């Protein structure tokens, strides 16, 4: 599946409203439900569609990066890839980004690459990336990025949503909701067998 970006204003407005509602629901679930944690021995999945993704080859897609260049997921073939669907207006998303920045620095020598896909406007993502010193690629979109998320098992369209993919391109784990620092590091060590 190759997803092509759209730019019409109505599509952007609908995507923003949809994303805002999904982000608010996930935020309330994460804040109100401490039992929402990752099980490192079994993939964390939130639906039958998510579960069906485990072990599958990652879907192909292309989106623009924050500099306007079209990027294809195959650029990261052969890497341990963590794809994080997020938005600047999503509090749980903003919470976990500093953990990803730290882990990208520490685990890059082990062939790790975080990849952020923002359901957002490029200028907002650029400013946020600059303010936080994000050290990994950021792509963006509206409905096109939501469709990529669905292709990766995010049937609810919730944010944040994270997918771990092995170097062979197989999906190893998914998670709906924000990670805590120790939780994401534990997941990386157990799913990717990092030391």
Image (cartoon, grey):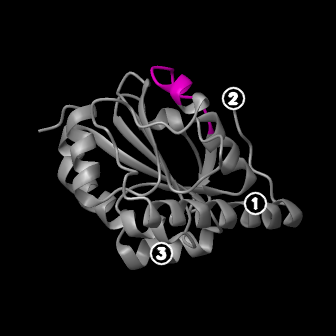
Image quarter for residue 155?
top right
At x 69%, y 33%, the residue is 2
Q: Residues within 10 Å of mark 1 (few under 14, many from 20)?
A: many
Q: Nearer the viewer, residue 163 or 22?
A: 22
Q: Earlier in the sequence, mark 2 or mark 3?
A: 2
Q: Residues within 10 Å of mark 2 (few under 14, many from 20)?
A: few
Q: Which residue is mark 1?
A: 15
In percent of width and height, residue 84 lies at 47, 50
Q: Which residue is mark 2?
A: 1
Quadrant into which the N terminus falls: top right
Image quarter for residue 165?
top left
Q: Which residue is mark 3?
A: 128
Establish if 82 lies above or below 129: above
At x 38%, y 64%, the residue is 97
Q: Which mark is residue 193?
A: none
Quadrant into which the C terminus falls: top left
Magenta residues, as a range?
Answer: 51-61
Q: Nearer the viewer, residue 153 or 104?
A: 153
Looking at the image, is mark 1 or mark 3 nearer the viewer? 1
Establish if 106 lies above or below 125: above
In the image, is 157 to the left or to the right of 74? right
């Amino acid at each position: 599946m190759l997803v092509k970006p759209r730019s019409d204003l109505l599509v952007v407005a609908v995507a923003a409203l949809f994303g805002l509602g999904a982000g608010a629901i996930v935020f309330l679930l994460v804040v109100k439900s401490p039992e929402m944690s990752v099980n490192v021995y079994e993939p964390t999945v939130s639906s039958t569609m998510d579960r069906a993704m485990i072990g599958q080859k990652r879907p192909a897609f292309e989106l623009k990066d924050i500099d306007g260049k079209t990027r294809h997921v195959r650029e990261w073939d052969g890497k341990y890839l963590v794809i994080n669907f997020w938005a600047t207006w999503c509090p749980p998303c903003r919470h976990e980004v500093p953990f990803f920045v730290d882990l990208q620095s520490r685990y890059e020598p082990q062939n790790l690459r975080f990849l952020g896909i923002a359901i957002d406007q490029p200028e907002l993502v650029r400013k946020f990336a600059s303010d936080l010193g994000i050290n990994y690629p950021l792509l963006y979109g509206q409905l096109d990025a939501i469709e990529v998320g669905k292709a990766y098992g995010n049937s609810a369209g919730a944010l944040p949503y994270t997918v771990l993919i092995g170097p062979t391109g197989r999906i190893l784990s998914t998670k709906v909701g924000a990670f805590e620092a120790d939780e994401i590091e534990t997941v990386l060590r157990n799913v990717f067998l990092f030391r």
